[in-house]
Image: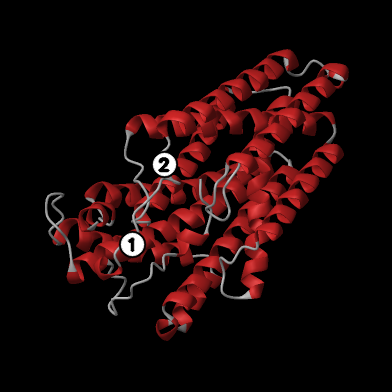
Amino acid sequence: MVNHENETMRFTKQDFAMVVLGMLIYVADIGADLWIVKKYFCEGHYLWCALILTTGLLSSVVIQFFSYNWFKEDNPANLNWILLLLHFLHAGIFTRYWFVLKYGYQASFQSNSSENTLIDGSTRIIHKTSIDAMADISMLRLFKTFLESTPQLILQIYILMTSDNCTFSQYVSIIITFGSISFATLDYQVALRKSLPDKNKFTKIPSKIMYLFYKLLTLTSWILSIALVTVLSTTFALILLLFLWFGGIVWVLKQHTEFCKSKASEVVYRIVVGIILIFTFFNIRGERTRIPMSVYYTIRVLLTLAIMCMCIFWNSLFNGKIHWSTVIIAVILTLVLGIIFLFVYYGHFHPSIHYAQDVVNTSDVVDGPGGETQETCRIRTFLMQ
């Protein structure tokens, strides 16, 4: 069991490079949002400008809220007014990037990180600290993906469908955003398995490809469907999203989640998870998902078919601005392919998240300076897949 755990709890140079890349993408995304806001403001599209600012601000507030609370839970003795000020100024995420880069550099470059060498003692603690810090960032980025990037993508598609003048850059931006959202879910899945020593690692390239296409295609189909509904009726689209959000929250409440230590934080967490469930499926309690996932995607298929029927019946409302029949074909095709990739992934490429595992020998586990015997990584009670 030591060898399995040693293989899992290792922060590599590749992990360090991915953290650096993630930070650069985060900064670039902020810059792109500001550029788009300026563009729409100068063109007089104040509503679009306000919507982008609202989603960006909401996402940032949630990220800072959880980031500061996690600092408070992990290091209550080290909290100071500077850390609070940084989070108040929406710069808390960069504090987390600083810590993961600091410890990650020590783990991947300064310590003996050879894959054939066992890591233990203080070296092993540095590796685990780096991996846990990376997992925290991946969770925060997941919040950003579904609180900001996904709603903004729907807005982009809506603008594309309702505008008379469409540019090549708009199409490229939408395609890149679809890819970045899917990659964010994949990155989270990799961080999830890496941070939990009793789970099979997500290292096989075919598994990552299958998972990526499953998420990309199902998300593409659903986001296009929501955009079509928004073109038909903005009011109906809002009602649909609110209904799905309410359904997601009801399911979260039935799961009796215990992710946060305070009731207020748990309420915010459940609200945010309800928003995430509007767009994609996640296993909230890390339990078997066959029945919940089957119900989730059955509802998704039925809703998509209902939306397609609405679009065909009220096709005159599109006013010839888009080739609605092409979009409908794209929605159905990506949905079918996404479901196929889902079955193939879980049938042949899943890293066996629910496989029969040997009980970890607690004497092999080192969790912090005190050598605690219980796994305390918060990602264990977050969102599984």
Q: Residue 100 carries which label?
A: 1
Q: Is residue 191 left or right of residue 166?
A: left
Residue beneath disc 2? 352
Give the Cα distance between marks 1 and 2: 28 Å
Image location (x, y in percent) of residue 292: 64, 43
The earlier-in-sequence mark between 1 and 2 is 1
Q: Image point 35% across, 59% down: which residue? A: 359
Q: Quadrant of residue 221?
A: top right
- Does residue 360 appear in the picture of this structure? yes
Q: Image point 56% across, 21% down: which residue? A: 337
Q: Is mark 1 on a helix, strand or loop?
A: helix
Q: Which amino acid does label 1 sit on?
A: Val
- Does residue 53 appear in the picture of this structure? no
Quadrant of the drawing holding the N terminus: bottom left
Image location (x, y in percent) of residue 16: 28, 52
Q: Is mark 2 on a helix, strand or loop?
A: loop
56 lies above or below 205: below
Mark 2 nearby-residue class (10 Å; few <14, some 14–19, many ≥20): some
Image location (x, y in percent) of residue 173: 54, 32
Q: Which amino acid does label 2 sit on?
A: Ser
